[in-house]
Amino acid sequence: MNRIICITGASSGIGFELAKFFHQSNDTVLGISRTYPKDVSFDYFLCDVADESSVRETFQRIREKYGRIDVLINCAGIGLGGAIEDASFDDVRYIFAVNVFGPFLVSKHAMDLLRNAGEARIINIGSVAGEFPIPFQAFYCMTKSSLHTFSKALKMELKPLSIDVCTVMPGDTRTGFTKNRIKPPVEEDNLYRERINRSLGRMEKDEQSGKDPSSVVEAVDRLLKMKRMPVSVTVGFEYKLFMFFKRIVPERIVDYFLFRMYGK
Ligand SMILES: NC(=O)c1ccc[n+]([C@@H]2O[C@H](COP(=O)([O-])OP(=O)(O)OC[C@H]3O[C@@H](n4cnc5c(N)ncnc54)[C@H](OP(=O)(O)O)[C@@H]3O)[C@@H](O)[C@H]2O)c1
């Protein structure tokens, strides 16, 4: 039986590569985002994951057309750069609405369709940034650590219902994420100006020379072949190593290095 795989954020970057890969593997792919991808060879639903009525209406259409979902991949997400002191409440609310409330709303409105599959899976695309908070990206890191927590709790709630949940944590990946990051303007006389420019400049360079999105596709494909998925997986050897060091090294040492890399 071919699987029905629903992917949010399928118009670009990681979500688009996932959609293309599973479509070519003969799964039925349902892509979701606010705009269409350049090449839509799979079924597509325009939807803003931050807006509950849009999510409700989208899953009603999917319910009528397909009746079930085997795999849900919550991939839609955005970044926000800048100093905490300068952040507007609207931008902070918006990034939480997309990165945290989006996966909640999508999972909630897809749940009966996942139950209809008998055995189903939810994969939430988190980030190593959720495990290593860095300056001038505080709110993005906060959304990803919230998503990791959401994902762990959801896994336990759904365990008796045969719906397995996993968080996939990529590191720097070459996608549209860098250009789509919200960056409020920083005035000439801003106290943090030089540090913001240095920090975000370094981050953007690392992202654009980062891994190909196919690294995340391979990780997700491996997960879907497993009988039971782990609570979370980190993508890439170097990021797995960072996660290992984080567990064994005192927190102040981790903070020291992160400050030197992104705070000075
Ligand atoms: N790139 C990295 O270095 C990196 C590292 C770790 C984790 N991640 C995570 O990977 C995921 C995918 O990001 P990416 O790197 O592939 O970035 P991307 O190329 O910018 O893709 C982001 C996707 O999210 C969709 N999206 C944004 N806001 C949305 C909304 N309100 N409703 C529906 N869809 C929305 C966008 O589509 P529309 O604009 O058409 O709506 C787009 O398809 C994100 O969750 C990101 O946090 C990325």
Image (cartoon, rainbow, N blue to C red):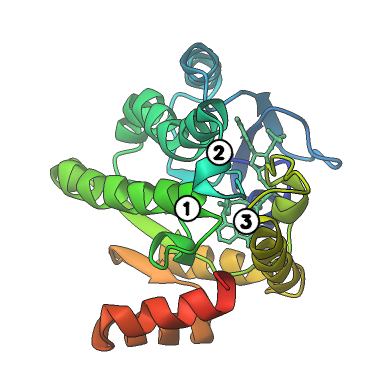
Q: Which residue is mark 2?
A: 87
The C terminus - image quarter = bottom right
Three-letter code, disc 2: Ala
Q: Nearer the viewer, residue 152 or 191?
A: 191
Front residue of this view, candidates 247 and 250? 250
Label 3 to label 2: alpha-carbon separation: 12 Å
Residue in the picture at 38% in, 65% down: 131
Using the image, determine if residue 224 lies above or below residue 161: below
Furthest-right residue in view? 38
- For label 1, the residue is 138
Whether residues under marks 3 and 2 lie with C-beta atoms below 8 angstroms apart, the answer is: no
**Cβ at disc 3 under 8 Å from ligand 1:** no
Query: Is 238 placed above or below 46 here?
Result: below
Compared across the picture, whether 181 is left or right of 234 comes to right
Tell me residue 74's x, y (percent).
49, 43
* Residue farthest to the left, as pictured: 160
Q: Position of residue 157 (x, y in %)?
A: 17, 42
Disc 3 packing (10 Å; few <14; some 14–19; many ≥20): some
Which numbered circle lies on residue 192?
Answer: 3
